[in-house]
Image (cartoon, rainbow, N blue to C red):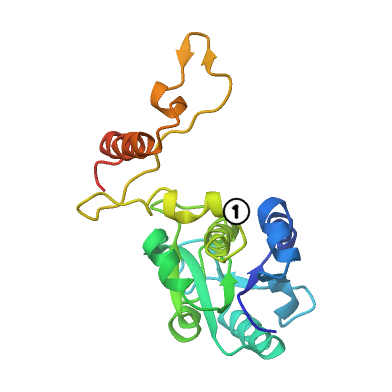
Amino acid sequence: MSGTQFHFLTLFPELTDAYMSASILGRAGARGLFTSHSHSLRRFASNSHGTVDDAAFGGGGGMVLKVDVLVDAVETLRSEFPAPRQKTIYFSPRGRKLNEPLVRELSAEPTQWLLVCGHYEGADQRFIDGWVDYEISLGDFVLTGGELPALAFADALARQLEGTVSHDSRAEAESFSLRSESGKPLLEYPHYTRPRTFRGLDVPEVLLSGNHPAIEKWRRQASEEITAKLRPDL
């Protein structure tokens, strides 16, 4: 097996399976643009009860995913699905924030991604130190599990693959890929469709003109204005 692969290591494989098999991603996967597999973490439990967590040393409440279970899972999956380039990501609020530059950096070449979806208080630090290549965060907030960040990562990377989305929807015209004259990222310009007038609200006249240079100029200006309004930090 080669090319870009997504392997979700999760307590809820039905969640990641459902998302990756639907809509644009489902069609792209069916065409072989990437492969996606979901693996239950409980498969790698060391007892018949499927225990994958334990109380934290030092107290403080909450349960921690066990290092032996996680390491066995990663090493087994790497062996079962050999690939020239294998990388493991653990998703947590402490990680590097997932953004467009990071997505482009990590999508530069085909990779087998093992996406570890944490739960409870997180994972034993020894696993993160010894078996994780990237620790990534979806943002400055805490979720109940790592499935949403893992799916966001897979979705963003899959969109970078040629053929996943149509040419007209390619990333060059989308938020954070657009650039100002000084090279700073811009948000995407507004979009409109029929009806031309709705409850007294009109589509900007320039978009109906057929004058493509004027349309491009309007879109550039609109991107700069909306970026200044909504994301002045950019």
Kindly tell me whether residue 58 is visible in this rendering. no
Instruction: Find residue 135 and report its horizontal and vertical position in percent.
Output: 44, 71
Left or right placement of residue 78 versus residue 210 in this view: right
Q: Secondary structure at mark 1?
A: loop
Q: Nearer the viewer, residue 21 or 30?
A: 30
Residue at coordinates 37% horizontally, 63% vertically from top-left?
A: 101
The image quadrant of residue 217 is: top left
Left or right placement of residue 194 versus residue 229 in this view: right
Question: Which amino acid, by three-letter code, is at mark 1?
Answer: Ser
Residue 42 lies, with reference to residue 174, above or below; the image says: below
The image quadrant of residue 2 is: bottom right
Residue at coordinates 40% horizontally, 33% vertically from top-left?
A: 211
Instruction: Find residue 139 and report its horizontal and vertical position in percent.
Output: 41, 54
Kindly tell me whether residue 176 is visible in this rendering. yes
Residue on which disc 1 sits: 166
The image quadrant of residue 67 is: bottom right
Residue 204 lies, with reference to residue 170, above or below; the image says: above
Left or right placement of residue 54 versus residue 227 in this view: right
Judged from this view, the residue extending furthest toward the front is 211
Judged from this view, the residue extending furthest toward the right is 48
Instruction: Find residue 183 and report its horizontal and vertical position in percent.
Output: 24, 56
Residue at coordinates 73% horizontally, 66% vertically from top-left?
A: 31
Instruction: Find residue 168 and report its horizontal and vertical position in percent.
Output: 54, 49
Q: Nearer the viewer, residue 155 or 88?
A: 155
Other-residue count near label 1 (Cα within 10 Å), few / some / many at <14 / 14–19 / ≥20: few
